[in-house]
Image (tube, grey):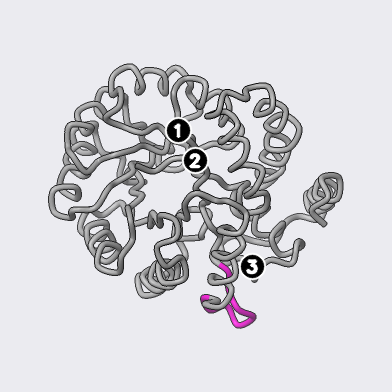
């Protein structure tokens, strides 16, 4: 259902630190113009941990209206509280999002049974396509392939954004779930390997700044133009993806967007501006690849 290059879109803020509605609209047009296949607002890259529930809902609504049905919108609606995740997911459905990206509950470290029951409850109560987001480095818990295979039996759980960094685990997902679950890379640096084992795309950080390259690389892979895909991946996507993690995401990508003249604004605390040495490295990379 969801495939190709889906951008984990940054949330731009105004000078006084409020959500930049016009900036969101401009970013949406930038991505549609450059071939992005889907937009994911209010993920970690969109600084969702620092958005109030009111702001979170506002960003999703603005994005859905700006996209106007041209490409899918998969709204981030996760929480470590099942009730909160339910509320945000229901809202996403009500305002017309095409799907919901729901992270595994963080900090409270549920068991595999708890993870299963969390996603099962949301899926059964809100009839919207759900992509599960597994990122153990952020949440402290790993959703195992066997648990995901159980969840794949629920009709509206349609995909997984896998950011465990473990290709063996991702291969197990493909083996156990088959066509019931769409595997999406949650790590730009593993995009090509994930495609090679049956993944269908990426929910991407680096696509915030090189949307056309990421989308076209995946299209080339799908068409069997493997060498062309490999060259773009190794020469552009991989090195720029590494630069996006000089510091905690989304600090470098939001800084890059600002340097490129895209709507961005400041980061919200506790995220801080880049350290000078890392900022200098980032600027050199952006200049090297012709982005500034």
Q: Which mark is residue 200?
A: 1
Q: Residue at x 47, y 55 (%)?
A: 39
Q: Residue at x 38, y 42 (%)?
A: 133
On screen, residue 235 versus residue 17, left or right, reads right
Which of the pair 166/137 is nearer the observer?
A: 166
For the C terminus, the image quarter is bottom right
Q: Percent from the top left, x then y, of residue 185?
A: 48, 34
For marks 1 and 3 on the same chain, the one whose residue lies earlier in the sequence: 1
On screen, residue 244 versus residue 22, left or right, reads right
**Chain part drawn in magenta:** 12-19
User: Residue 240 sits in which quadrant?
Assistant: top right
Tag 2 near tag 1, CB within 8 Å = yes
Residue at mark 2 = 4
Element class at badge 1: loop
Q: Percent from the top left, x then y, of residue 87?
A: 23, 63
Q: Percent from the top left, x then y, of residue 215?
A: 58, 43
For the N terminus, the image quarter is top left
For marks 2 and 1 on the same chain, the one whose residue lies earlier in the sequence: 2
On screen, residue 18 versus residue 181, left or right, reads right
């Amino acid at each position: 259902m969801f495939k190709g290059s889906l951008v984990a879109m940054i949330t731009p803020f105004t000078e006084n630190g409020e959500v930049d509605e016009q900036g969101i609209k401009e970013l949406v047009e930038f991505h549609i113009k450059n071939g992005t296949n889907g937009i994911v607002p209010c993920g970690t890259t969109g600084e969702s941990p620092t958005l109030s529930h009111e702001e979170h809902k506002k960003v999703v609504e603005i994005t859905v209206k700006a996209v106007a049905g041209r490409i899918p919108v998969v709204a981030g609606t996760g929480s470590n509280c099942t009730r909160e995740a339910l509320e945000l997911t229901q809202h996403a459905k009500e305002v017309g999002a095409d799907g919901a990206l729901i992270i595994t509950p963080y900090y409270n470290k549920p068991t595999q049974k708890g993870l299963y029951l969390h996603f099962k409850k949301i899926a059964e109560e809100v009839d919207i396509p759900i992509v599960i987001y597994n990122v153990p480095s952020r949440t402290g818990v790993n959703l195992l392939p066997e648990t995901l295979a159980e969840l794949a039996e629920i009709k509206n759980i349609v995909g997984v954004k896998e950011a465990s960094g473990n290709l063996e685990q991702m291969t197990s997902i493909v083996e156990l779930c088959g066509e019931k679950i769409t595997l999406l890379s949650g790590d730009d640096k593993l995009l090509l390997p994930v495609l090679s084992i049956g993944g269908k795309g990426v929910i991407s950080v680096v696509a915030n700044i090189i949307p056309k390259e990421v989308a076209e690389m995946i299209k080339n892979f799908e068409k069997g133009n493997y060498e062309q895909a490999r060259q773009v991946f190794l020469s552009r996507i991989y090195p720029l993806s590494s630069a996006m993690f000089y510091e905690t995401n989304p600090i470098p990508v939001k800084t890059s967007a600002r340097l490129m003249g895209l709507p961005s604004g400041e980061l919200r605390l506790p995220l801080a501006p880049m350290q000078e040495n890392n900022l200098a490295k980032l600027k050199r990379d952006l200049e090297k690849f012709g982005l500034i």
